[in-house]
Image (spheres, grey):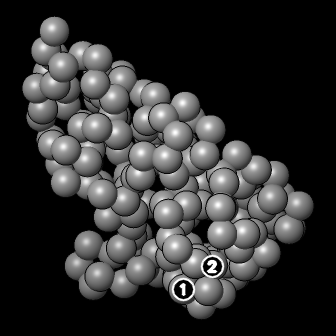
């Protein structure tokens, strides 16, 4: 059975007609050519399919696309600054701390890290490990991934400080869409 859904995909409105039983991951990859979320396990166990739904991490491999109707969905493709192309601080943190080896888990790690740092801009390593505990890295780069998230937290704090004027008011608009 087909249904029509309206989503805000990486900041852009989309209207799609999809089979009500298709997963969001399938629609993203097949219909919208969004390839950062990966099919890893199909059971919401590995995290490679993670996207942000209204700012919260969600496993797109088990979520029906029809349930995303009305939602804002963010993927890696939507993180860079729309006008400048500058990478999101979490992406920069992963680059600077070399937090990826093969990259298959990278999508889930980055998206989960963004959600963590929005809720806790000052995490310690234990907080990072707890937030990422359901994201699997088969290459074994967990130490580098944790370091990447810690670096991303520093970058986000630096950006927040730079955007606040001496009187405590914001001096710059929002950068990236996520």
Other residues around mark 1 within 10 Å, as few (<14) / some (14–19) / many (≥20): some
Is disc 1 in contact with disc 2, using a CB cutoff of under 8 Å?
yes
Q: Name the residue under label 1.
A: 95
With respect to residue 138, does 29 lie above or below? above
The residue drawn where x is 42% and y is 46% is: 39
Q: In this view, does 42 lie above or below 66?
A: below
Local crowd size for mark 2, using a 10 Å CA cut-off: few (<14), some (14–19), many (≥20)? many
- Whether residue 130 is visible to the viewer of this picture, yes or no, is yes
Disc 2 designates what residue?
Answer: 99
Quadrant of the drawing holding the N terminus: top left
> Residue 36 at x, y = what percent?
37, 59
Query: Mark 1 falls on what kind of element?
Result: helix
Q: In which quarter of the image is residue 95?
A: bottom right
Whether residue 87 sits left or right of residue 9 in the image: it is: right
Mark-to-mark CA distance, 1 and 2: 7 Å
Q: Is residue 12 visible?
A: no
Q: Nearer the viewer, residue 20 or 114?
A: 20
Q: Tell me what residue is drawn at x 66 percent, y 54 percent.
A: 136
Position of 118 compared to 127: left or right?
A: left
- Residue 118 on image: x %, y %: 62, 57
**SS for dot 2:** loop
Name the residue: 85% across, 68% down: 125
Q: Residue 116 carries which label?
A: none
x and y, in percent, of residue 48 in the image: 51, 52
Residue occupying the point 46% across, 28% down: 62
* Percent of width and height locating residue 110: 55, 64
Q: In which quarter of the image is residue 157?
A: bottom right
């Amino acid at each position: 059975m087909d249904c029509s859904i309206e989503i805000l995909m990486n900041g852009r409105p989309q209207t799609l007609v999809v089979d009500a039983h298709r997963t969001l991951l399938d629609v993203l990859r097949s219909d919208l050519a969004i390839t950062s979320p990966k099919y890893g396990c199909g059971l919401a166990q590995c995290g490679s399919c993670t996207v942000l739904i209204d700012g919260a991490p969600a496993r797109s491999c088990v979520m029906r696309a029809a349930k995303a109707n009305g939602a804002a969905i963010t993927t890696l493709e939507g993180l860079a600054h729309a006008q400048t192309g500058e990478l999101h601080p979490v992406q920069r943190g992963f680059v600077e701390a070399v937090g990826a080896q093969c990259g298959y888990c990278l999508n889930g790690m980055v998206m989960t890290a963004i959600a963590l740092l929005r809720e806790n801009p000052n995490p310690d390593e234990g907080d990072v490990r707890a937030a990422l505990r359901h994201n699997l890295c088969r290459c074994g780069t967990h130490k580098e991934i944790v370091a990447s998230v810690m670096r991303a937290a520093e970058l986000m704090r630096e950006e927040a400080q730079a955007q606040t004027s001496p009187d405590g008011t914001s001096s710059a608009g929002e950068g990236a869409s996520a």
